[in-house]
Image (cartoon, rainbow, N blue to C red):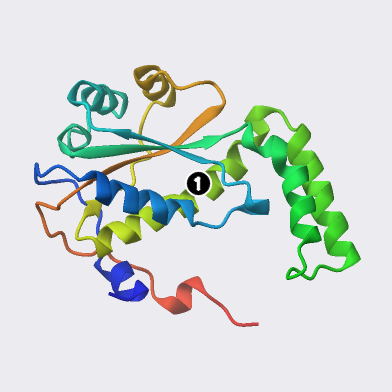
Amino acid sequence: MDVLEAIRKRRSIRRFKKTPLSEGVIETLMEAARLAPSGSNIQPWRFVIVKDERLKARLCRAAFSQKFLREAPVVMVCCGDLLSWKAAKGRSEELISRGDIHLNRESEEALMKRAEGASSAEMHERVPTSMLNVAIAVEHIVLEAVELGLGSCWVRLFDEEKVKQALGLPNNLCVVALLPLGIPDEEPEAGPRLPIHTISSIL
């Protein structure tokens, strides 16, 4: 299956078969996430893989009783580590020192200025950038899931504090998404999409 085919086949799945996911399948999904790009190669994503029925029930309640979270074999709680950006300056220096990345002086100065800002920022100021980077990794998981015959659904409707309380997550983690995963037990039609000419322009 090529990438565009996986993109076309992807659906938001809210009904799952009860078939459990093997450790090998979960490791493959995590490998897809691990290989995602991130700003200055910070890799701020952290994943909590929830199989326990009681914990899934608590996640369901934290997500305003969306019952498919409880019924999915696995729910990945996709988080960003807000402390990871403290390494931004060092990681940016590593990028600049690499021989295969050619930045001019202006670009290097802009990169280091941004890195210093990220390193010294308060934790809450790092949330938007963390969410963006984690989202890239999550979509890697979503598309690899299609390749493996699995379904998933991005869930952003939840009470973050209740999710963190349910799992005992530390303050430095921000919850970006809940991602239920399993073998689909439905075949929903694709939702309508805007035509290309309404979402792009050539200058």
Res 32 visible: yes
Q: Is residue 145 left or right of residue 110?
A: left
Q: Is residue 192 above or below residue 56?
A: below
- Check disc 1 and report the residue beneath it: 134
Q: Residue at x 81, y 41 (%)?
A: 116
Rendered-image quadrant of the C terminus = bottom right
Q: Find residue 140 and report its horizontal and vertical position in percent.
A: 41, 57
Q: Find residue 188 and report its horizontal and vertical position in percent.
A: 15, 59
Res 191 visible: no
Compare residues 142 and 62 and report the one nearer the observer: 142
Q: Residue at x 26, y 64 (%)?
A: 147
Amino acid on which disc 1 is placed: Val
Q: Find residue 3 and report its horizontal and vertical position in percent.
A: 36, 72
Q: Residue at x 34, y 52 (%)?
A: 29
Q: Quadrant of residue 193?
A: bottom left
Q: Find residue 139 and report its horizontal and vertical position in percent.
A: 40, 55
Q: Is residue 29 left or right of residue 56?
A: right
Element type at mark 1: helix
Q: Quadrant of residue 5?
A: bottom left
Q: Is residue 150 above or below residue 22?
A: below
Rendered-image quadrant of the N terminus = bottom left
Q: Quadrant of residue 167?
A: top left
